[in-house]
Amino acid sequence: MITLKTIREGERAAVWNMAGKVKYIDGPKRLWLFRETFESLTNYSAEADQYLAVRFTNGDIKHIHGPAAVWLDPVLHANIEIKPLIPINANEAVVIYQRTNKQEVNRRILQGPAQYMPEPNEWLHRFSWHGADPNNPKRKKPSALAFTKLRVIPDQMYFDVQDVRTADDALLTVQLMIFFEIIDIERMLDQTHDPVADFINAVTADIIDFAASRLFEKFKQDTEKLNNLEAYNNLITRAKRIGYQVNKVVYRGYEANPKLQAMHDHAIETRTALQLEAETEQQAQELADLKLAREADREKQQRELEHKRTEHDQLMKQLAHQQVIKQNQAEHKQKMEFEQESNILELKHLHEKNTERANYLKQMKEMQIDLTQYLVAQYQNPDRLIRIDGPNGDNPQLHLHE
């Protein structure tokens, strides 16, 4: 029987003949098949963040990093899978194991940022640590925290150390917060399988030692010391041995059994009430002292203000008096200067007038004019008359000098 098959462009097909041999045909093509078997092949393609896991019929496995595309060959390939690359952030690391031969395995650490494509002979280390118990968040449960990407940045965890007894048999639960960071991943892998469990055991030993040597009242007084790393010698030593560093431990409080806690709460309430009463009375006394002090300061400021106002008034009067004196002096000086200038001008004018008259009389004398008669005629009614006679009754001779 003859069959017509069409292979589109971009497709591939396998054609089997009666002898069982296969040939591969790429489209576009049109085939006439006689006693042949037609099989369309699947194309597997991976993007940049994917890879192809190709499993061959002989048992070999090959991983191809994307972007890539492979046609499934029914003769060579058992199957092909498209898998995503494993993203590793900048604050993460993965531990990779690689089998070099049947007996040897190498280990290496890959820190981000990266995209990891595992080789067929590689696998990732899977961590299984203590984690929070979903049923009781205050407790840590083994293997509750499972992951393959290790965080290499500073981290923290909450932990409650339970059943802690003081020297007087007070049963307590101490609440802590531990801040830590990994320093050496290789040392951590070699020295521990669960760092959280090591932290729990070490800090529990430190808290038990701290409480066992103190009475309950002394324990309450010394709780501030639980914020210092000096109180956690076992924790610091164990963390350093497994490649970690403890940066800080914060004491968050404690819980006691109900009866002890009730007694303690009542004592706290009483002590707090007395303290509040004392503080209220102290604040009232301080307020009264403050009022008196403020009133005294206010009176002092008023006296100082009045004194300054009086000094200012006196200063203003003094300045006004000095200004009047300066003005009078200026006016007197100006008047004296004016009178002096007037006298100078008057004298100058009189001098000029006398000079002109003397010149006039001189000219009249030169013209043989009797100056006495002239002067007497000029002044008909003098207030007084001065007569000058000679020694013998003769007319005297008058000489005028300039």
Image (cartoon, rainbow, N blue to C red):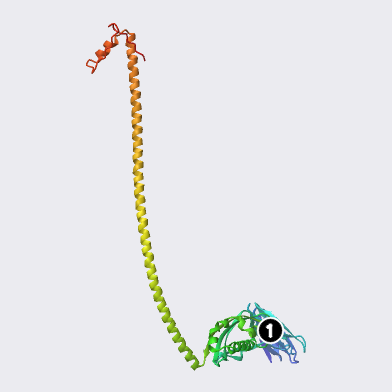
Q: Is residue 273 above or below residue 317?
A: below
Task: Pick whichever, 276 or 71, lies toward us.
Answer: 276
Q: 10 Å neighbourhood of mark 1: few (<14), some, or many (≥20)?
A: some
Tell me the residue at 61%/81% (across/down): 229
Q: Is residue 350 visible?
A: yes
Task: Pick whichever, 84 or 397, lies toward us.
Answer: 397
13 lies left or right of 139 = right
Q: Quadrant of the C terminus?
A: top left
Q: Secondary structure at mark 1?
A: helix
Q: Is residue 72 visible?
A: no
For label 1, the residue is: 241
Q: Quadrant of the N terminus?
A: bottom right
Tell me the residue at 33%/22% (across/down): 350
177 lies left or right of 367 = right
Q: In the image, what residue type sits under mark 1? A: Arg
Q: Position of residue 369 (x, y in %)?
A: 30, 8
Q: Position of residue 209 (x, y in %)?
A: 61, 88
Q: Position of residue 234 (x, y in %)?
A: 64, 85
Q: Is residue 291 above or below residue 350?
A: below
How many numbered dots are placed on residues in this image?
1
Q: Is residue 295 above or below residue 318?
A: below
Task: Pick whichever, 227 or 193, lies toward us.
Answer: 227
